[in-house]
Image: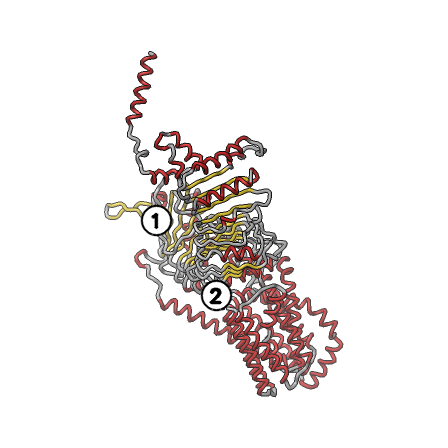
Amino acid sequence: MMGSFKQQKVSERQNIDDVDDKISHLPDCILHHILSFLPTKEAVATCILSKRWKFLWTSVPCIDFDDSLLYSSRSNIWHLPEVTHFMNFVERVLLFRDASRIKKFRLSCRVCFSASHVHEWVSAAIRLNVQELDLCLFVEEPFVLPSCVFDNASLNIVKLEMNCILQLPSYISFPCLKTLHLCLVTFPNDNSMQKLFSSCPFLEELAVLDCEWMNLSRITISIPSLKSLTIDDLPFCSVDDLRGCEIKIDAANLTFFKYSGYLSNEINLSDLSSSALALIHIPIICERRLEIAYRTVKLFRGLKNVNSLRISSGTIECLFLAGDTLDHLPMFQNLTLLELSRGFENHFIGLLLKFLQFLPKLESLHFLEGVGTRESNCMLKLVPYCVLTTLKTVNFQNFHGCNAEMDFLKFLLKDALVLEKINVFCSKSLSGDPENQKKIGNQLHELSIGSRHCTLVMISLKQSTLSIPGSDFLRRRSPVPEFRLPVFSPLAVAKTFRSSIVSLSKPLHVSSLESLTPCLKKSSNNGKEKEQSLVTCKAYEADRSEPIRDSTLTRSEAARKVKIGTYFATWWALNVIFNIYNKKVLNAFPFPWLTSTLSLAAGSLIMLLSWALRIAETPKTDLEFWKTLFPVAVAHTIGHVAATVSMSKVAVSFTHIIKSGEPAFSVLVSRFLLGETFPPSVYLSLVPIIGGCALSALTELNFNMTGFMGAMISNLAFVFRNIFSKRGMKGKSVSGMNYYACLSILSLLILTPFAIAVEGPQMWSLGFKEAVSQIGPQIVWWMAAQSVFYHLYNQVSYMSLDEISPLTFSVGNTMKRISVIVSSIIIFRTPVQPVNALGAAIAILGTFLYSQAKQ
């Protein structure tokens, strides 16, 4: 028995020896390449296979040392024998390695083992002309990398992760470096970091991840070859101290820019190219919101040329926390793809629609994580221009079928006139509920569609261990390039899913797929059975769908232009009428505090009656809304009273000339109080504004200091009103008309006690009797007219903000001021000197140039 067993073992050994070892016969270069994918510890272990493999590891182009296994399960690691074994292993590998060039050297270890050894290991890799250096070093005391690391002509990729100050030598040179990643390091000072970035003339990719900028005040990243830039500031941001570094980025060839953080550092981004892709995530925090909001707006001004943008819901809210956002956001003329991620909830839909007004050429809108399931009070009345004219594709992911989501789908289907496809990816819960899917499919079928060639595809996704091919839609390649990163990862439809599709169009029907066979019935036609959809079309036949006609779009655009023109004409006319009656009242009844109070009271009464009679929809407000609106109302009250006081002392034309200098106050307040900077063209546009106002004031025949100061105070107050105004609408479903109505009511409550204290009923009674004796009963009509027209012209201006862009509104405001000045001069026969008229023209021209420069 024993002899038989030995013979069997010998036979098996002979059979193994007879097997042809094809791998060992491969050339050394191929074996080296194979071994380069293994950790160095495993690569060295192959030396025991045979004589052929004994020294192959000494020429492997990639070296990877990682001591993490030593302390993964132990608390005290300082005297472990494994530590000594690890250090000896690294020493022996580097000692026995041949002189061939290293392609990649990776070292991850605790420097506290022995800083001198780590220093020598890195130097040894540099001496072997390493091309990629990847260091992950955990230090507890200051550690300085070898100077040869920063003066190297062979390095193409450098990745440094060190939890300490990055000590840099006096001389730095990276003539061939293309990729630089810095993680966890603390930057030493401005000069050292500026020298580091300036010493990489051919750098193409830069990533700064979780680094500390606290020692820097200003840094410029100006690298013409830079194509990709990633800045991640999330974990180590201190929102209590926003005195971070000012980072200026000037990279003309940048095609990818990603930022995640609280903007503790102020980023000045030069205009990116139209081919660039930007990913922005700015979380919402409770502290220092206004400062972060202005930095967000400033960052977005540098993104105005990009064609693809991915942002989070917090980023959109930050944009509209800044009170004068509409005055500072540019028009994104090249943006065709917008992706929304990071838990985009439906209560941000109102802000999203406002943001879409700045994207006139948007073609694709993707909700990567759905629009949320909470009920929303958002009234979908604002229809951005891109929704009407350019939007073609919409993707919904994580769709639950709640009322808020259905309302938004209904809004898009109705108002998106050139929409071609809406792809709806069901949530996990909806995917597991076929009955609810069928119910929602029937509801979608009933929706009206503004675009005749729109198709709505509903996709039920269920994870499966089997690789089952998806539908044609899942395999079809999108015309818009896809981009995916770890932070903003969209739902990966490329994974293995069991798919069921509900495809709805004009007509809408449920697709005939195996997973939806219960939705099909069989009918007999000449003895033959065929499948039919249970969902039938009531609007169009399947073969009668036609593409949208140009005349439909033309009529829609023409109607919109007529609407905007009507707004402008009404706005200007009401403003002119108000100023005429207001001046007549103040000439006969010089009590500006009461006049201002009556104006607010008339508007409040009009809107209260409109709400009571349901002529206008009652706004849905809460206590938080009124608290936020209070500072806006205070500024509005001061500005309104100051302007009325001014017009009671000087000519209407002079007041409006001085009020045309409001942009100068806006820039000064934003610059010195909020820390915001502007391009040189904006500052230059202030020269004609200030010069024109000064020239008009000096040459005014009926100059009055009270009137002049009233106009100046009004300018300053309205600037602060603009700064706070958008905060009154944050997260609220309040239209422009209702917002101004609420503002008027609150301002009336603030102003009334002050008006009584300053002027009082006794003075009003005496003044009214004198006015009636001089003018007659028509003074009552004048007072009523000025009060009503004041409210109407302001109401129309706020309503127009929902329909037009900020630039159009600025131009319209300039033209309105011209019409008021000219009409008041004609009606009141105000004497005007040529120099005074020249000053007015220069000031108004400067206002127009300012509105253009800010775009």
Q: Regarding mark 1 in the picture, which secondary structure is present there?
A: helix
Using the image, determine if residue 844 lies above or below residue 311. Answer: below
Of the two numbered discs 1 and 2 on the same chain, state the one appearing first in sequence.
2
Say which quarter of the image contains residue 74: top right
User: What residue is pinned by disc 1?
Assistant: 475
Q: Nearer the viewer, mark 1 or mark 2?
A: 2
Task: Single out the residue that lies furthest toward the right.
Answer: 762
User: Is residue 611 shown left or right of residue 487?
Assistant: right
Mark 2: amino acid: Met
Q: Nearer the viewer, residue 335 or 376?
A: 335
Number of the label disc, if any, that sits on residue 331: 2
Which residue is painted at 35% across and 67% down in the image? 550
Using the image, determine if residue 228 lies above or below residue 358. Answer: above
Residue 610 seen in the figure: yes
Q: Nearer the viewer, residue 87 or 347?
A: 87
Mark 1: amino acid: Arg
Residue 540 x/y as whole percent: 34, 58
**Few, some or many residues within 10 Å of mark 2 (<14, 14–19, 20+):** many
Residue 771 x/y as whole percent: 69, 83
| Whole-number angstrom distance, CA of label 1 to CA of label 2 | 35 Å
User: Tags 1 and 2 in contact by the CB under 8 Å rule?
Assistant: no
**Few, some or many residues within 10 Å of mark 1 (<14, 14–19, 20+):** few
